[in-house]
Image: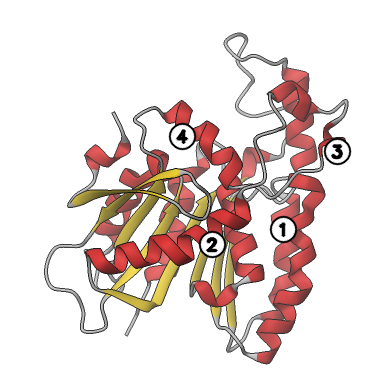
Amino acid sequence: MTSTEMAVNAARLEFTSSISNRDYRLFVSVPPGDAPVAGWPVVYLMDGNLHFGITVDTLRIQACWPETQNAVVVGIGYPTDSLQTALALRNFDLTPPHDSSLAEDHWMRAMGSLDDFGGQSAYLRMIEEEVKPLVAKHCPINAADQTLIGHSLGGLTCLTSMFTAPANFQHYAAISPSIWFNNRSVLSYVEGFEATMKTGDAKVRLFLSTGEYEEVSPMRPRYPAKGLPVPESTVQAMWNECAMVTLPSQLTERLKPLCGPNFDMKFVIHREEDHRSVVPAGIAGGIYFSQYRPD
C-alpha cells in the first residue's frame, strides 16, 4: 500500500531520467474543476512515496477556505510500493557528495553504508529539466507560482535549491532540514543567496520548521527498549550533533535581515514533535504559508 491510495484525482507518471539514469514515479493530483486562467499553482513534494497522500489531503482541506488557493500536487518518488526501498533510494538523491573522512569513528558509521550519497545536484536538475515539463504536459500550470517541499534530507535539498537557484521556485518549505549533513556544507551557499536577494534578481518565500523534541537530552519520546539496530547512545549522539533545533534557529537569525520586498520567511518550532511526528505539522504549515492568498 502507498500513500497515493488516499489521494483524490491521483495519476502516476513514470520515466527514466537521462540526467541521473534513475527511474522515477511522479504522483500527480490535479484539483477538480477548471484551471485558473494563469494555470494551476504547483506544489512539488520530495519523498512522494512517503508523504503524497497527506499532502494532497491537507491542501484540499485547506483550500475549502477562501484564503487558501488550490494547487496541483506532484509527489516525486520511485516506481516501488516498498517504503524501505524508497527510503534507500532517496538517500542518494537528496544529499550532496559526502566527505567520508567526517564519518570515521562517528555515529554515521554505525547507521549503515556511507557510499550511497551525492546525487543532489543531478536530482535538482532532473526536477527542473524533466519533471516540470512532464507536469506541464499533464495539466495547465502556472510557472510563476511553484512551491518545493521537503523533510529531513528533503529539507536540506529544499534549502540547497533556494540558496543556489532561488528563481526555480517562488515558495520553499524546508521541514526539519538536515543542515548538519557533510559538515553543514549547505551553509556555504548562504552568502551568495544573500547577495541575490539584495539585488532583487529573485523573489522567494521560505517556511522553515522543526520539532521541539528533535534536540533534547534525554531523548523524547523515550528510546525503544528493543527493535532498533543501534544502541541508544548512538542515536543520542546523532541527535546532539545534528542540532535540529539550533541550526534552523541560527539560520533564521541570519536570514531575517533579508526580509523585505524580495524575501519573506516564517520559522516554527512545532511543540512536542520529534523528527518522525513533525511531518504532518510541517506539511500543514508549509502548505498554508505557500498557498495563502488573502485577496
Disc 3 crowd, CA 10 A, few/some/many (<14, 14-19, 20+): few
Q: CA distance from mark 1 to mark 3?
A: 24 Å
Q: Which residue is mark 1?
A: 249
* Disc 4: which residue: 86
| 155 and 168: which is toward the camera | 168
Label 3's element? helix
Badge 1: residue crowd in 10 Å (few <14, some 14–19, many ≥20): some
CA–CA distance in space, label 2 to label 4: 20 Å
Q: CA distance from mark 2 to mark 3?
A: 27 Å
- Amino acid bearing label 3: Leu
Disc 1 is placed on an element classified as: helix
Whether residues under marks 2 and 3 lie with C-beta atoms below 8 angstroms apart, the answer is: no
Q: Say which amino acid is labelled 4.
A: Ala
Report, in whole angstroms, how far the alpha carbon at label 4 lies from the one at label 1: 30 Å
Q: Residue at x 31, y 58 (%)?
A: 59
What amino acid is found at the position of numbered circle 1 in the picture? Ser
Q: Residue at x 31, y 63 (%)?
A: 135
Q: Which element carries disc 4, helix, strand or loop?
A: helix
The answer to whether marks 3 and 4 mark residues whose Cβ atoms lie closer than 8 Å is no
Q: Which mark is residue 102?
A: 3
Tell me the crowding category of disc 4: few under 14, some 14 to 19, or many 20 or more residues within 10 angstroms, Cα based.
some
Disc with the residue nearer the chain's start (2 vs 3): 3
Compared with residue 119, is residue 169 higher up or lower down, i.e. above or below?
below
Work out whether mark 2 precedes mark 4 in sequence or the reverse, and give the earlier one. Answer: 4
Q: Would you place residue 263 above or below residue 206 in this image?
A: below
Tell me if residue 280 can be seen: yes
Q: Position of residue 107 (x, y in %)?
A: 79, 27
Of the residues under marks 4 and 1, which one precedes in the sequence? Answer: 4
Return the residue at label 2. Answer: 125
How far is disc 3 from disc 4 in space, using C-alphas?
26 Å
Comparing labels 1 and 3, the label whose residue is closer to the camera: 3
